[in-house]
Amino acid sequence: MMTSPAKRRVLIVTGHHFAEAPRKVDLHFLADALRAGGGHVDFLACRLSFISRFLKDGRFDHARQRPRNRWNRIAEGLEEFLWSAPFHPVNLKSPLLNRLTTPFFRLYDRLLPKAVMARMAGYTHILIESGPPPLLVHRLRHAAPQARIIYHAADRLRTIHVHPCIETALRDGIGDYDLIHIMADAMRADFPADAPILYLPHGIAKETFDRAKVSPYVAPRNAVSVGDMLFDAQVVDTLAAGNPDWTFHLFGKKAVPSVPRANIVVHGEVAFETIVPFIKFADVGLAPYRQSEGADYLSQSSLKMIQYSYCRLPIVAPAFAAAGRNNVCAYDPGDAASTVAAFRRAQTFDRETIETAGILSWEESVRRLFDHEGLKERN
């Protein structure tokens, strides 16, 4: 018997995101949908320690302004625990140093706070995001034998360059998961053939897009780029230089051009609701991913590409991230002529041919994920 939506109590363990932030990602939308159904969601944000002071991802500056190492109520049905540990696993970018630190980082789960462990018996589901959280799963499984644990494979671990011990922990602990949620079919081969896998793409906030009625643009010919993961500034520079009659809008903390230009607008990291009309009323969507090992899954898992498609935008993206989408005008990374040609194709693409029927809302996505038949009741 499945847990009713109102009785779901979900722990989201993430190494990348806080429960509330200017930039909403898939976990925030999932949490919103769970709460809308009457459920309760806790965020456990890890990957914070004294080491964070020396990293340039902005997490430490954000975390120091908020309560740490205790539960903090954010809203009705939503709480957050910012776990600042004595250390956390970091890829030291040296095979020797990574080998030497592996036994040390494998102790990370022993640092889990008592206040977190005290809640384990009450969770119906635990969602483990890709990143450091797989190091914690074995202890969480023992503390919450009744919970159904889902691995939320948002990214390949080698693509986001985690410490190798995390990849080992995921592989060795695969039996602790009740479901492996992949957002790209290309990731299926990353897991054992007998693993309980569910291929389920991201949902989107359809109602928010549908409500947007007013264009934020003051001039025609606008291209939009959302997010900064593997952001390739050279692509934007090339397109802006070759298309001075177009305006290129960049959203994301690290989404900045190499060369400032009059027709490039850097918006930075802003609220999701602010970005929506920029996507909906754009002429072209950009997904300028930089080449990285194992990044082919992005063609299906990229949330922005799903959002672009829902708004029937032609997409300019590298060939390695183009599979399975007929509205992608692909270019060869590092080839300026190919990039320019892809953008020209996008300008004349027939947007009426872009199919949107298969795109899910977040409510539909949550229902399929948490009511999946592979998630058996645990005693």
Image (cartoon, helix red, strand yellow):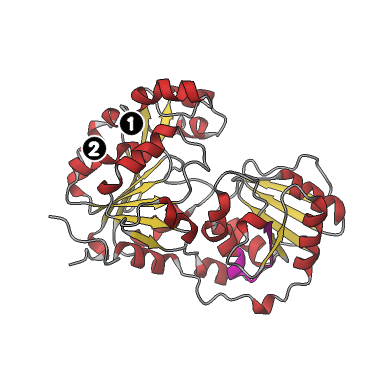
Mark yes or no: residue 25 visible.
Answer: yes
Tag on residue 55? none
Q: Position of residue 72 (x, y in %)?
A: 34, 40
Q: What's the residue at 62%, 69% (across, down)? A: 311
Q: Position of residue 85 (x, y in %)?
A: 36, 27
Q: Do the residues bearing badges 2 and 1 touch, measured as CB atoms within 8 Å?
A: no
Q: What's the residue at 51%, 57% (across, down)? A: 301
Q: What's the residue at 85%, 50% (across, down)? A: 241
Is residue 75 rendered to the left or right of residue 51? left
* Residue holding disc 2: 139
Task: State which tag comes first along the sequence, 2 or 1.
Answer: 1
Read off the magenta span: 308-318
Mark yes or no: residue 263 visible.
Answer: no
In the displayed structure, would residue 77 be above or below residue 93? below
What amino acid does circle 1 point to?
Asn
Element at badge 1?
loop
In the image, 117 versus 294, the foreground residue is 294
**Mark in the foreground, 2 or 1:** 2
Packing grade of label 2 (10 A; few <14, some 14-19, many >=20) is some
- Quadrant of the frame with the N terminus: bottom left
Packing grade of label 1 (10 A; few <14, some 14-19, many >=20) is some
In the image, 147 versus 74, the foreground residue is 147
Q: Position of residue 60 (x, y in %)?
A: 49, 30
What amino acid does circle 2 point to?
Arg
In the displayed structure, would residue 92 be above or below residue 328? above
- Quadrant of the frame with the C terminus: bottom left
Tag on residue 69? 1
Is residue 246 rendered to the left or right of residue 74? right
CA gap between label 2 and label 1 equals 19 Å
